[in-house]
Image (cartoon, rainbow, N blue to C red):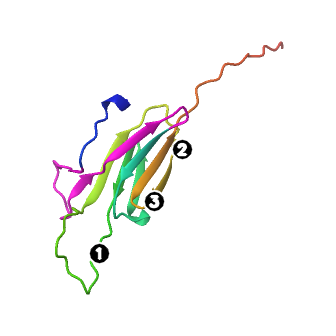
Amino acid sequence: MTQDIQARDKQELQSTSEQTTPRRVFSPLVDIFEDDQALTIIADMPGVPSNNVSIDLQEDILTLTGAPSLAVPDNEEIVVQEFETGKYFRQFTLSEVIDQANIKANLNHGVLRVTLPKIGPAKPRKVQITEN
């Protein structure tokens, strides 16, 4: 799985449907790590407060969305604006090895960390035979 993931720059998503808001939509950059216990997704969402992040899980699709809160103070005006703002949206299809009931997330300084614990494999054991 991780061999197919390529690094890329922040990209605006091209929608095939009509938008009802004028905001641009970006795919946040992610790093994905794996160990024996879990997969971890780290998504870059600068300027997004935790109350503007949504993580939804429906039919094995994990959806990350976030909206930055970059208000300009009343006494200032924008002189140069290089940071492109807009909503963040990214989806992942989860395999059957993910323990969907125990997914956890943390947002720290615009970096969202989503931990996807794995369901442990069946452990070998001896089955007791009883007589009736």
Q: Is residue 39 left or right of residue 126?
A: left
Disc 3 target residue: 108
Q: Secondary structure at mark 2?
A: helix
Which residue is found at the position 19% from the left and 68% from the top? 81
Residue farthest to the bottom, as pictured: 75
Q: Secondary structure at mark 3?
A: strand
Residue mark closest to the camera, 3 vs 2: 3
**Residue 86 visible in the picture:** yes
Disc 1 target residue: 71
Residue mark closest to the camera, 2 vs 1: 1
Q: Secondary structure at mark 1?
A: loop
| Amino acid at circle 2 | Ala
Residue mark closest to the camera, 3 vs 1: 3
Q: CA gap, disc 3 to disc 1?
A: 19 Å
Which residue is found at the position 42% from the left and 54% from the top? 112
The part of the chain drawn in magenta is 10-38
Q: Which mark is residue 101?
A: 2
Mark 3 vs 1, N-terminal side: 1
**Residue 59 visible in the picture:** no
The picture quadrant where one finds residue 58 is top left
